Image (spheres, grey):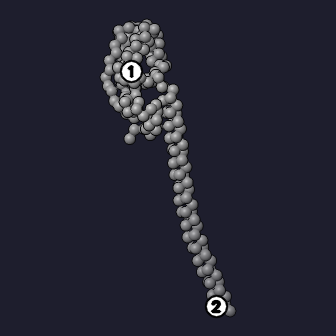
Amino acid sequence: MTLWHRNRVNKTLLLAAAALVCAWILLGFYFDQRDSLTEQRDGKSQSMADAIRLLQQESDLRKLTARLGTSVMSDSSAAEGQLLHLVHDWEQRAGANNASFQRVGMSEEHGFVLLTFEVSAAGDMPAIAAFLYQIETASIPLRVENVQMHSKYEGGDEVQIHLEISTLYRSDAARSSGPGAASAPELARGPG
């Protein structure tokens, strides 16, 4: 009887060990599948969030191009003239002096042409701060690319400022396709 009992115990232990190995394998497979599905869900959630953000950017750009409407000039000389007039007016109102204005670059992208200018002015700190505020709150599409400011004279109150600013106008391709028709999705997509 002891032999029979020992064989039975051995069989039971062997079955229990086999059951544990099977359970371990099944649990490993389950957790691997669960991790894979979780990664897929997270990837799809990220893709959905990216798509929603892209649609929101397109909507914002459509609104922007509709708002800009008449403030975006149709050729380079009109855009440059508009900016030159505004910069001169801002310098006068701020009390800045020794102003210079020069176009340094031009590039076309997404149906718009970007014009880049260097602007320099001098004056006391309140005048330069007022001039900079006027540029930052411009009613036309304007971007400050670079700012350098330094004292004009050692220990003096006079400040010299050099700005690189850019504005844009619609290229011929954008005008022919209508306001914002093809250019807003291209702008939302971004470069590259």
Above or below residue 17? Residue 42 is above
Residue at image location 62% in from the left, 83% down from the top: 10
Residue at image location 53% in from the left, 38% down from the top: 56
Secondary-structure class at tag 1:
helix
* CA distance separating discs 2 and 1: 103 Å
Residue at image location 44% in from the left, 37% down from the top: 182
x and y, in percent, of residue 20 in the image:
60, 73
Q: Nearer the viewer, residue 187 or 87?
A: 187
Above or below residue 62? Residue 143 is above
Secondary-structure class at tag 2:
helix
Q: Nearer the viewer, residue 46 or 59?
A: 59
Q: Which residue of the protein is positioned furthest toward the bottom in this rendering? A: 1
Residue at image location 65% in from the left, 86% down from the top: 8
Quadrant of the image occupied by residue 105: top left
Q: Which residue is mark 1?
A: 79
- The N terminus: image quadrant: bottom right
Q: Nearer the viewer's eye, disc 2 or disc 1? A: 1
Residue 54's label in the rendered image is: none
Quadrant of the image occupied by residue 13: bottom right
Q: Which residue is mark 2?
A: 3
Asked if residue 163 can be seen in this view, the reply is no
- The C terminus: image quadrant: top left
Above or below residue 101? Residue 9 is below
Question: How many C-alpha atoms fall within 10 Å of the one at disc 1: few (<14), some, or many (≥20)?
Answer: many
